[in-house]
Amino acid sequence: GENVEQHPSTLSVQEGDSAVIKCTYSDSASNYFPWYKQELGKRPQLIIDIRSNVGEKKDQRIAVTLNKTAKHFSLHITETQPEDSAVYFCAAIGTNAGKSTFGDGTTLTVKP
Amino acid sequence: DVKVTQSSRYLVKRTGEKVFLECVQDMDHENMFWYRQDPGLGLRLIYFSYDVKMKEKGDIPEGYSVSREKKERFSLILESASTNQTSMYLCASSLSGVWGGMNTEAFFGQGTRLTVV
């Protein structure tokens, strides 16, 4: 089955700096790669996603890149703000009815 | 707005009790999932269902069973609760890509924090 590794497990940055979180996956059939943000005490919510036919996608301060050959994808957050502090999860989904395999999560702390 | 609702936010049960966690979604999604979230272990899939009465084991199904009698409802059952099942349980739903569509994001419930004493 699919295996997703996520790094780093914790990340601390200064407000205004950039943050990068990386994930690798094992199943070359995976075709959809969402990123979720989970604030303390709340449910995970989608912040950005990318499909396997696209190499990069951007939404304001957030971007995701995908390298299918190397089987890794990354989340980039620019101009970080304290409200970006949360746990971020990557996921990879193949053809099996949308079953998501999640990374273990990255706890991002943005210091004011 | 998609809504996934879990029946309880907090539960405290005794060892050996049979426990039911209920999840309802209102967007006609084919897929429904039960995850367990523990610190440092991310989101681990217990069971998922891609249609009524259909179910597949996830990564950690031992000690759990599920029921999906109606499309909108997916129940997680702990046959005999144990202390190592103390955790946060998250339900999710999504549209299915298996019938020729595209896989899409999962929408999560608010979570049930279960404590087994």
Image (tube, rainbow, N blue to C red):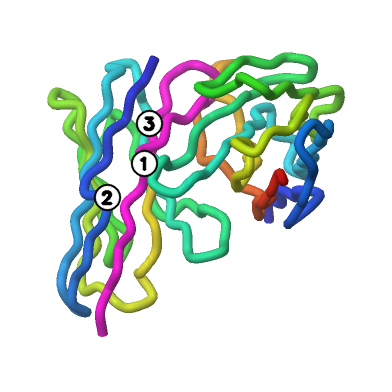
Mark 3: amino acid: Ala
Q: Is residue A77 above or below residue B61?
A: below
Q: From which residue to which does the magenta span run?
A: A90-112
Mark 1: amino acid: Asp
Number of on-image labels = 3
Mark 2: amino acid: Ser
Q: Are marks 1 and 2 in contact (CB under 8 Å)?
A: yes
Query: What residue is disc 2 on?
Result: A9
**Label 1 packing within 10 angstroms: few (<14), some (14-19), many (20+):** many
Q: Nearer the viewer, residue A66 or B17?
A: B17
| Callout 1 secondary element | loop
**Label 2 packing within 10 angstroms: few (<14), some (14-19), many (20+):** some
Point out residue A36 in the picture as x, y percentages from the top left corner: 43, 50
- Residue A69 appears in the picture as rendered: yes
Q: Are marks 3 and 1 on the same chain?
A: yes
Query: What residue is disc 1 on?
Result: A104
